[in-house]
Amino acid sequence: MSEEKPGVNMVENVKELLKAHAGLKHEVYLDNENSSIVPGEVVEAMLPYYNQRAYGNPTLTHKPGWEAFEVIMESAQRIAGFLGCKTLEEVNFTPGETEANNLALMGTALSMKDKGKKIVISEVEPINVLNVTEMLQKSGYVTTKIPVDNEGFINLERLKAAVDKETVIVSLSTVNHEIGTIQPIKEALKIVKDQNPQTVFHTDASDAYGKIPFNVQDLGVDLATVSSYKILGPRGIGALYVKERVNIEKILEGQIGTQRLWPGVENTPLIVGFTRASELTFQNFEQNTSHLRKLRDKLVDGIVETVPDILLNGPKGDRRAPDNANISFLRCEGEALTIELSLKGVYVSSGSACSRRLLQPSHVLVAIGRKFDEAHGSILMKVASYHTEEDISYALEVIPRAVERIRGITGSTGAE
Amino acid sequence: MNVSRAPLPYNPKILELFRNPKNLGKMEDATVTAVAGNPLCGDMITFYLKINDQDVIEKASFESYGCAANIATSSIVTEMIRGMKLEEAWNISYKSVAEAVGGLPSIKFHCGILAVGALKRAIRKYYTRKGAPPSWLSAEPSFEEKQALEEEELAKALSRRMKLEEGK
C-alpha cells in the first residue's frame, strides 16, 4: 500500500525536498512566528555556560552551582527590569510560551478551585490557551470566548458581561500572534477587576515583549507570558510573570530549584540566551521597532502594489505590532504557496494546513470574519531585526511570481 | 483542533508534478467537465475530458485549487487516463493514483480520492447527458464520488457552524 508511515521514507523524502533547494542565491526567513534565527551574539553569550562556567546545578553547594545560581538570578533581574516587575521573584522561567500559558491557566485553576469554575478568553487566543481551556472543561470548567471585531479587537462589553463572581481567570493576549492586533489590555483589566477583583488576569505577551511598550506594573496584570524565540533568543525558554501575592500552583511535580513554579534542573545557557536577546532588543528599543515597522510596511506595500486580489488581515498603523504582516491571497492555496516560496528561498507559514479531509482554517482569521477560502490563502510573515532592505526586496521579487504561478494552477477553478 | 503539523514530506515525484504539472489548464473544446471539492475545503479540482465517439478519452486536463498533493494527483490522473476507454478509466481507484505518485502522506489521501472523485463525476455526467448509461456504470455513487460529496457537505456545514458561532 502506498501510505507513507513515519520513518525512513519520510526522512528520505525530506532529503530530496532539501536537495530541491540547492543553489539558492538568497534566503529570507519570515516565519518568526513559529521559530527564529538566533543571532551569533546570542549564541556566543550562551556557549560558555555549557562547559566553561556555571554548568552546575544552581541549588547545590559548590562553585559551578553557585555560579549558576548567580547567573540565573542576575538574568531574572534583567528580565524583571525589562518587564517592569517589582521583584525578580516575579519572573518564573519555563521552557517556553506553551508551558507558561499552561502554567498560568492550570495553575490558577488549581489554586482557585474553590472560588469558581469560569474561564474567560477571546476567540483569537493561541492554540496553547484554547487547548488548555478545552482540557479544563473536562473537569467542569466553563469557558466563555469573547468575540472580536473585523480587526481582531476584543468586544469589551461582551467581556464585562462574561465576568462574574465565579470567574477565576481571564486570559487575553496583549498582541495577537497571527494578525498583530494590540488589545486594550488596560481597559480590559479594569473591566474584569470591577466585575470581580479576585479574578486572575493573565496575558500572553509573547508578541508584545520587545515589540511594543509593555510594562506589567503599568498594566496591572497578574500573570504575563513571554517567550525567548519571539525576540530572537533560543527556543525552549520563556517566562511567566507572576505578580507578588498572586497565588498559583505548580502543575508539574519534581525537584524544585530556583524556580518555584517549574521543577527540574534550570537550563542555564538558555536562560542566558534569553537574557542576552532581551538586552539586544531593549538596548535600542525605539530604533529596533522603527526598523521592524519600516521593513514590514515595505513588504506589505510592495505586495499591495504588485499582487491583485489580496486582503490585508488585521489592523493598520499604531494599533498593530510593528513586525506582523498577514495577507490573504485569493484563488491561491496557502500550503502550495508556502512550498513554492520555499523553493525560491522565502520562508513563510500559511494560515492553514491541508490535513485529513478538511483544511482547518486559522481560527483567528475566521473570528475576524474571513471566509474559509480567504483564510486558506493566507500567509503570515514576521520581520525581524536581522532583516535588511535587500531581504525584503528579494521577498518582493519572489512573492508576486509565486502567487502568479499558483493562481495559474487554480485557473478558473472555483470561479462562480 | 489537535492537528499535527508533521512536515509533509512529499516524495520527489509529487514535488516534480507540483513544479511541472502535466496537462494543466482549461480545455475549451472539452466534451465534459466536472468539479470535486470546493474552495471552503481548501481543495478543489476541475477535470476537462475530450471524449471521442468510441468512448475513448482523447485528452484530459485539469485545474486545481489545492495543495501540492492535490495538484500532483490531479496531474497524474490526466496522464493515466489519456487514451483509455471510459470503462477502464472508471476502474481507476484512489489507491492506484496514490501509488502512481509514489505514495501520499496519510493526511493527504483525501487529495487522491478527490481527484478520482472528479474523474468519476465526469464519466457519470457524460453518460447521463448521453442518456444511455452502460451496464458497468452503477447507479450507486462510487466510493470516491461519495467521499467527494461528503467532504463538500462537511465543509459547508463547518462553515455554516462557524458563521453561526460568530453571530452569537
Image (cartoon, rainbow, N blue to C red):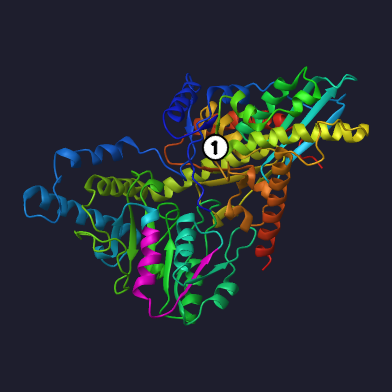
Q: Is residue A213 above or below residue B37?
A: below
Horizontal side of A23 relative to B115 (left or right) equals left
Residue A264 percent location from the top left of the image: 22, 55
Residue A43 percent location from the top left of the image: 28, 38
Horizontal side of A354 relative to B24 (left or right) equals left
Q: Residue at x 53, y 51 (%)?
A: A178
Q: Residue at x 28, y 45 (%)?
A: A273
Number of numbered discs visible in the structure rendering: 1
- For the residue carrying disc 1, how many other residues have a C-alpha within 10 Å: few (<14), some (14-19), or many (20+)? some
Q: Residue at x 51, y 46 (%)?
A: A293
Q: Is residue A80 above or below residue A187?
A: above
Residue A266 percent location from the top left of the image: 22, 52
Query: Residue A179 or B9: which is nearer the viewer?
Result: B9
* Rendered image quadrant of residue B36: top right
Q: Residue furthest left?
A: A62
**Residue A174 in view, yes or no:** no
Residue A219 percent location from the top left of the image: 42, 68
User: In the image, what residue type sits under mark 1?
Assistant: Ser
From the image, tell me which residue sits under label 1.
B106
Q: Residue furthest front?
A: B135
Q: Is residue A71 above or below residue A303?
A: below
Does the magenta portion include A112?
yes
Does the magenta portion include A242?
no
Q: Secondary structure at mark 1?
A: helix
For the C terminus of chain A, the image quarter is top right
Determine the chain carrying the residue at label 1.
B
**Residue A38 in view, yes or no:** yes
* Rendered image quadrant of residue A239: bottom left
For the N terminus of chain A, the image quarter is top right
Residue range in magenta is A100-122
